Every structure is written in C-alpha cells, then in structure tokens.
Image (cartoon, grey):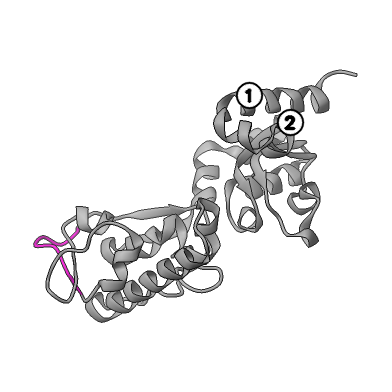
Amino acid sequence: GAAQAAGWRLLDARGRDLAPGGASLRSLARIEPPPEPWSARVAAACDVSNPLLGQRGAARAFAPQKGAGPGEVGVLEDGLAVLAERISADVGIDVSSIAHGGAGGGLGAGLAAFFGARLEPGFDRMERVTALERRIGWADAVLTGEGRVDETSLDGKVTGAVARLCAGAATPCLVVAGDVALPAPLLPAERALGVSAAVSLVDRRGRKESFGETAACARSVTADLVRERLAPR
C-alpha cells in the first residue's frame, strides 16, 4: 500500500494492479518503479527486529495477534514470500531476512526496498528524543503496556524495552496489557519482563467486558493497580 501510494506498480500476470491485502500478493508477477524516483532520505523507526519471512517473520509472529488462523497465516506468508522474490528480481534488493523487515506487517522490508529507508530500532530513537532513561531515573514509578504481552514484547517492543530501562534504574515498572499470552516457561509475566507487576484486562475484567468496554476497563484496572502497588500503606 505504501509503495503503491508513492507510484510503484505491483502487477499480476495480466498487467493489472493488485488489490489491497496480503492475500493478493500471491498473484504478484511484476513490480514497476514510479515515473519519478524517490529522492527523500527515509529513516524507519521499527518496533521489532523480526525479519520478513520465517517462524519469526511478519505473518507467523504477528498475524495470530490480530486474529488470523493457521490457514490465513499460511496465505500471508506465501504472499510475503512472493513479494520478497519479486523485490529481489525487479528492484535488486534482498529483503527476505533483513533485521526489522517484518515490522508493521512487512512495512519495514517495503520501506527498505521502495524508499531506500534505513531501518533502525524505533525504541532507541524514541529514547534519545525523549531522554527517557534520564526521566525514568528520577521517576517514582513507571506505567507502560500494550494490547497483548507475548514473546514479541521481549524482542524490541516498547513494553520490554521500558522494563529494561526501569530495571537498570531500580524504578518500579507496572505493566497493563489487554491480554498476557506468554508460553508457560516464561510465566509469570513479571519474571519474563523483569517488572514489579503485569496485569491484563482479560484476567481482571473478563474477555467480553475487556473487548466491549476497553477504555473503561483500562482506566479501572490501571487505577486498581496503582492503588495496590503505589498507595501509601
């Protein structure tokens, strides 16, 4: 989508532009560059280091988080594999295994291929811009979180990275997530993340209420956690 918006054409065997969506990439037969080459310098701040393809790739690592079943994951992986093959043949860049290529559902690889982007850890850039490590050093406690805490949270995402900075500063870190889905060997979540507490809306309010009244659940669960952990005794 980003490439097409910038004038690149992703075409099937009959020369038709591909429809949006990962499944259509399976029909990709040719990539044509835009009339005017991209001239701006691009730095892509990526939230994960995962590659485009494979067990840790965009489809297999992240599509299940968004509700994709095994069959849909296979379709997405096949589409991304075709995309990587055509990028190699038509653009002359191998994006199949570059670090951060799987970020944003494969957008990292696309930015590198179609925009000449330099891929870098997004948290590192954010930390520099906000002086986060210094701020964490004088904070009494830090609240962070994400929709779903799982193994990818330990691989460059904000929650895991903030937890590491808090551990280095001996600052209590509290995590509020929509759900916690770590494999059994990594549980409890507090141990895996190295934090003072990690709670989920699903555990505390149930799946139906968490999905139906997410904002209200997030407020109440966060308030409860702060009272439990930080209120004067």
- Amino acid identity at mark 1: Arg
In the displayed structure, does residue 7 sit left or right of residue 190?
Answer: left
Which residue: 32% across, 79% down? 85
Magenta stretch secondary structure, dominant: loop
Q: Which residues are magenta?
A: 30-38
Residue 141 - label: 2
Q: Nearer the viewer, residue 142 or 187?
A: 187
Residue 78 is left or right of residue 3, and the answer is right
Residue type of the residue flagged with mark 2: Ala
**Mark 1 touches mark 2? (CB < 8 Å):** no
Residue at position x 38%, y 75% from top? Answer: 81
Dot 1 corresponds to which residue?
A: 219
In the picture, the disc for residue 201 is none
Q: Is 60 left or right of 44, judged from the image as shown?
A: right
Q: Nearer the viewer, residue 218 or 144?
A: 218
Badge 2 marks a residue whose secondary structure is loop
